[in-house]
Amino acid sequence: MAIQRPTYQRPDPSVTGSTRTRVVITLGDPNGIGPEVLLKSLHDPHLAPSIAPIVVGSAHVLRQHADVLGYSDLTIHAVDTPPSTLPDDGVVVWDVTGGETHDVQFGQITAQGGALAMQAVEAAVDACLDGTADAMVTAPISKDAIAQAGYTVPGHTEFIAQRTNSPRPMMMMVAGQLRVGLVTAHIPIAKVADAITEAVIRTKLEVLSEALQRDFGIAQPHIAVLGLNPHAGDGGVLGLEEETIIAPALEQARADGLQVSGPIPADGYFATQLNSGYDAVLAMYHDQGLVPFKALAFDRGVNFTAGLPIVRTSPDHGTAYGIAGKGMALPGSMESALQVAAFTAQHRQSSAPAMQ
């Protein structure tokens, strides 16, 4: 496949003014498409006015991806610590490898790739915590690779929650006005029903409502809540969780002042009620929310982690090993992740006094 080579040049920084959000962006798994979609996204001139990007990972890895894409003239500024000001040309890479070089093995799951990906995540989280960065965006990682590297967490969300001492993280998918929160995320489907309790649902509703207010500027959010069973239990015929767990949790949430509706049958919600005035929907488990979300917004969807003291977003796709190194990856989701990170970080900063 022939790769069309664009002219790589950062837009004139003079158009950015003083409102750019300082975003640290992890490279993700070096053997996947993360570095590729990042490079393509940074080429988008529409991002320059709002984002001051600092790539976190390996400069050597980024160079290999750039060469494959035809960006051989790209200037890469490798630094040991995030600089206070960014150069007008090229890309700044905060190299966390300690000078080691890692050769890319496109499409391969390796322990080295998992370790390198997580080193970048650790550094990016710390930069957000100490105020060096305003937000972080994470390129895709491989759960298999990070497990081979010795990490025991199931994914980004759980790792970042641990490192930021956040007991109430929530995976939330965003695409414009479509926002989907999850009660349960990365657990086996056989454990979902037992993991759904009144207390958990109320907590997720609180976190989702707070995020909608603090990060998305919705003063009085209205949340739709899906049922767990087919047809939301169909009056108890297809399951009792709606009557015994979900409905009581919603009743208590309303008593606490939240605007919530449900439980709503999940099979029809995304086809019939997306335009019903809800600001977000809370799904009971991973695929219940993500399958329709990705069907509707796969090329622009964003994974936003609610309930953290820092802003973190990610593209809504994985490492895509099958097309890594072929120049085929679409950058839309990464571009959206950068935009959402900038928007929510700026809104969080502006609304901080009102939320205290």
Image: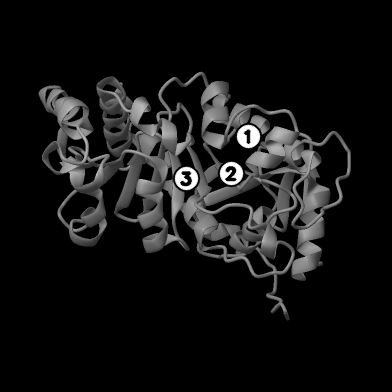
Give the numbered dot on residue 138. 2
Above or below residue 159? Residue 87 is: below
The structure residue drawn at horizontal position 66% and vertical position 37%, both measured from the top left corner, is 84
Relative placement, left or right, of 283 versus 14 is: left
Above or below residue 87? Residue 195 is: above
Categorize mark 1 by other alpha carbons within 10 Å: few (<14), some (14-19), many (20+): many
- Tell me where residue 201 appears, x and y as whole percent: 28, 28
Q: CA distance from mark 1 to mark 2?
A: 9 Å
What amino acid is found at the position of numbered circle 3 in the picture?
Ala
Q: Tell me if label 3 and label 1 are in contact, CB under 8 Å.
A: no
Q: Nearer the viewer, residue 233 or 210?
A: 233
Label 3, on which residue? 341
The structure residue drawn at horizontal position 18% and vertical position 56%, both measured from the top left corner, is 273
- Tell me where residue 292 appears, x and y as whole percent: 36, 56
Helix, strand or loop at label 2? It is strand
Label 1, on which residue? 124
What amino acid is found at the position of numbered circle 1 in the picture?
Ala
N-terminal-most mark, 2 or 3: 2
The residue positioned farthest toward the right in the image shown = 100
